[in-house]
Amino acid sequence: MGFPGTWMTESESVVYRVVPKCACSTIGQIMYYADHGSFFDGDIHDASTGLHKWSQEASQPAIEKAVKGRKTYAFTCVRNPYTRILSSFFDKVCGIQRNGKRYRGNMVPMLVQKYGVEVGGDDGKQEFDQIAAFRRFLLFARDTIRFKKPMEPDIHWSAMAGHVSTFIVNGGRYNKIIFTEKFDEGMAEVVSKMKPKHAIDLKTIPRFNESEGHGPKRAHPVEDYFDDLSRHLMWEVYKRDFQLFRYDFDNPANKMPLGEVDLDEVHAKLGE
């Protein structure tokens, strides 16, 4: 199995487990900048040089040695499950992707047909009932995660705990889990541990939100999208995310974590 979704600086100063929809573009660019003194020109997910990635076979021995040796500072980043699934919906389901097409080809037409999800027309720009559409999408996301039907779950809405756990199960250990909502604070600690070749000023670094502008803007407060049934589905699928990463299940309006992550608890529960 190895370490899927794991990136490491070429200087081997830091190891990062990518969790989709959790500031991964910005984190990847910071890692790239730390070694090279410039940002990657384009989406960091497309970079095939300048950063070790598990998806690149040549990088695998270096990543495996660093992770299993536990001498290299290792971290990941998580996000409030309510805002993460909403972001996935507007970006991946409603949005037109960088290549000018719908995400995953026939997925959106199938969502429209089988779940009655509206997505704003062919170009994603028409008005539609965002709340009703999202709630139907949430039912689909639950079906993919719980029953693997009508398709396997997508990495953008599969539970964060699942992404985080592969790193632990295969022999890694995190030194830090940071919050997207407290990004500068958490990343400052990571940067201080990695001692970058090129100084990083977190206050001036741009936010590389590669999904920005793909889909319609969210028209309502977060809490408006989650009625009683929606919250029941969220608990069914993301219970571990809320509990382990200290997010407020009872109040969707509160995007901030309720406390720090207990790393020992995360390793115990996700390493089983």
Image (spheres, rainbow, N blue to C red):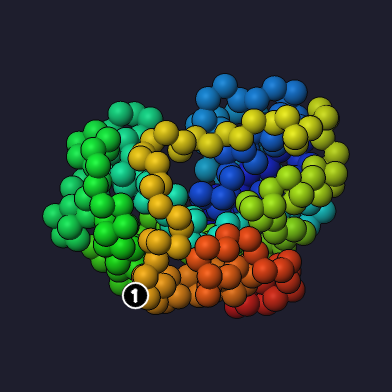
Q: Residues within 10 Å of mark 1 (few under 14, many from 20)?
A: few
Compared across the picture, whether 5 is left or right of 246 comes to left
Is 125 in front, or is 122? 125
Q: Quadrant of the C terminus?
A: bottom right
Residue displayed at 21% across by 46% down? 106
Compared across the picture, whether 8 is left or right of 138 comes to right
Compared across the picture, whether 233 is left or right of 177 comes to left
Find residue 187 and report its horizontal and vertical position in percent.
Answer: 74, 46
Quadrant of the image occupied by residue 53: top right
Is 6 in front, or is 123? 123
Count of residue discs? 1
In the depicted structure, whether residue 86 falls above or below residue 43 = below
Is 219 in front, or is 100? 219
Amino acid found under the numbered disc labelled 1: Leu
Quadrant of the image occupied by residue 254: bottom right
Res 8 seen here: yes
Is 26 in front, or is 69? 26
In the depicted structure, whether residue 126 falls above or below residue 185 = above
Find residue 34 and report its horizontal and vertical position in percent.
Answer: 75, 32
Mark 1: which secondary structure?
helix
Find residue 162 and report its horizontal and vertical position in percent.
Answer: 52, 65
Compared across the picture, whether 249 is left or right of 77 comes to left
Residue displayed at 34% across by 75% down? 229
In the depicted structure, whether residue 4 falls above or below residue 263 = above
Res 108 seen here: no
Find residue 18 and report its horizontal and vertical position in percent.
Answer: 58, 49
Residue displayed at 63% across by 77% down? 269
Residue displayed at 65% across by 64% down? 257
Q: Residue furthest left?
A: 113
Q: Which residue is mark 1?
A: 229
